[in-house]
Image: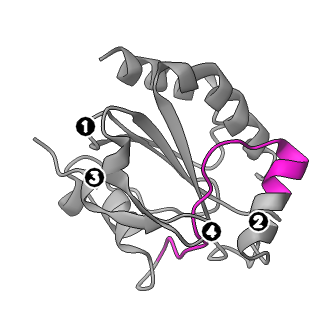
Amino acid sequence: MQPSIHQFTINNIEGEAVPLSNYKGKVLLIVNTASQCGFTPQLEDMEEIYRDFRAEGLEILAFPSNDFGGQEPLEGAEIQQFCLRKFEADFPIMEKSHVKGAKASELFQFLGDHKQNGAVNAKPNWNFHKYLVNKNGEVVNYFLPITKPNSNKVKKAIQKELNS
C-alpha cells in the first residue's frame, strides 16, 4: 500500500484546519493555482469537471501560490472572491502556500516526490500543476499545467478512479 495524503492537515482559505482524512473515499484533483497566470482560465475548466463529477465523489482542492512569477498577488478572502466572481468556482480553496523548493508545504513536498508518495516524481514547474489522488489518498497521476482539467485525458483518469 502506498503512502497516503490522509496524514496531512491543511488550512482552508479562511485559515481553518482541514484534515485531509476528511476526504477518505473521495477522488481528489489537487491543483496549485494563481489569479494572474495565463492558465488562470483553467479555474473555469476545474469548476466544469467539479460539477460533472462531484456527485460521483470528486473533490477539487485549489492551492493558491505565488511561487511562479509572482502571479498570485491576492491574499485570503480576495482570492476566494476572485475565484467566485470571475469563475463561479465552488470547489474548496485552500490557504495560499508554497508549492516548490525548500519552502514548499509538506503536502506539496509529498505530492511531488516519489520517495514520499510511492508513485510519481513530479514537482510543480508552474501554476496549475495537477495531482490525481485515489479514494485511499494515494497519488496515482499528475498532469502538467498545459493539460486542461477538462481534457479527455484528465476526465478519463478521474472516471477510472471514481469507478475503482
Vertical order, 101 against 143 (above or below): below
Q: Quadrant of residue 80?
A: bottom right
Tell me if I can see residue 57 in this picture.
yes
Q: Which residues are magenta?
A: 82-100
Q: Magenta stretch mostly in which secondary structure?
A: loop
Q: Earlier in the sequence, mark 4 or mark 1?
A: 4
Please tell me whether residue 10 is drawn above or below residue 49 in the rendered image: below
Amino acid at the residue labelled 4:
Glu
Rendered residue at 79%/78% (across/down): 73
In the rendered structure, the answer to whether residue 104 lies left or right of residue 134 reads right
Q: Residue furthest bottom?
A: 102
* N-terminal label among 1 and 3: 3
Q: Which mark is residue 6?
A: 3
10 Å crowding of disc 4: few (<14), some (14-19), many (20+): few
Q: Is residue 163 left or right of residue 2?
A: right
In this orientation, does residue 150 appear?
no
Labels 4, 3: front one: 4
Report the residue marked by disc 1.
136
Identify the residue at image location x=58%, y=69%: 95
Q: Amino acid at mark 3?
A: His
Residue 124 placement (x, y as % from top left): 51, 62
Task: Compare marks 4 and 3 and give the one earlier in the sequence.
Answer: 3
